[in-house]
Amino acid sequence: VVAATERELEFREIETVAALDAALQEARTAGQPVMLDFTAEWCISCKEMEEYTFPDPGVVAALEPVMLLRADVTTNDDDDKALLKYFNSYGPPTIAFYDSAGRAQDSFKLVGFVPADEFAAHVERLVTL
C-alpha cells in the first residue's frame, strides 16, 4: 500500500508592488483568483497558519484554483512598507484576496490566525465570485 503524498501549497514570493501588479495581471488574464499572504519570521500567528491552516487537506483543496502569493515583510524595508501601505495593513498576518476578474475583495481580507475549516469555507466563497 502506497500512502498518498501530502500536497503542499506553493507560494510565489512577491517583494514589490510592481511584482504584485505583474502577478495580478497574469492571474486576471488566466481568470484566476489570488490570495496574498503577508508573513514574517517574527510573526507567531503566521507560523500557526503555516502549521495548522495551510497544510489542512480542505484548505489545500479550496486553494487549488487560486494563485498563491506571499510577501515576507520580516525586514520591514521600504518595499515591505510600500506593500503593507498598499493594503492598509499594519503587518502580518494579513491575507488579501482578489476575485478571478482581478478585483480586490476587501471584505474578504483576513487579519490574524484563522482555523482551517473557517479558512477553507472563506476561500470557497471567494472562488464562487
Image: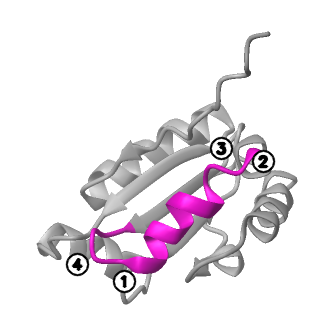
Tag of residue 23? none
Q: Which corner quadrant of the image does residue 7 belong to? A: top right
Callouts 1 and 4 close, C-beta under 8 Å: no
**Pair 4/2: label in front:** 2
Q: Residue 91, labelled with which disc?
A: 1
Q: How crowded is the residue under tag 2: few (<14 C-alpha within 10 Å), some, or many (20+)?
A: some
For marks 1 and 4 on the same chain, the one whose residue lies earlier in the sequence: 4
Q: Relative to 95, is 61 on the left or the right? A: right
Q: Nearer the viewer, mark 1 or mark 4?
A: 1
Q: Compare marks 1 and 3 and give the one earlier in the sequence.
A: 3
Residue underneath mark 2: 62
Question: Compared with residue 88, is residue 57 higher up or lower down, i.e. above or below?
Answer: above
Report the side of 56 relative to 97 (left or right): right
Residue labelled with disc 4: 81
**Disc 2, SS:** helix
User: Can residue 88 be seen?
Assistant: yes
Residue, disc 3:
66
- Whether residue 103 is visible to the viewer of this picture, yes or no, is no
Labels 4 and 2: the sequence-earlier one: 2
Query: Residue 72 at what x, y percent from top left?
Result: 30, 62
- For the point 73% across and 64% down, the residue is 116
Q: Which image quarter holds the C terminus?
A: bottom right
**Residue range (magenta):** 39-57
Alpha-carbon span between mark 2 and mark 3? 8 Å
Asked where in the image residue 88 lies, by quadrant, the reply is: bottom left
Of the pair 17 and 72, the residue shown nearer to us: 72
Tag 2 near tag 3, CB within 8 Å? yes
Within 10 Å of disc 4 (Cα), the crowding (few <14, some 14-19, many 20+) is: some
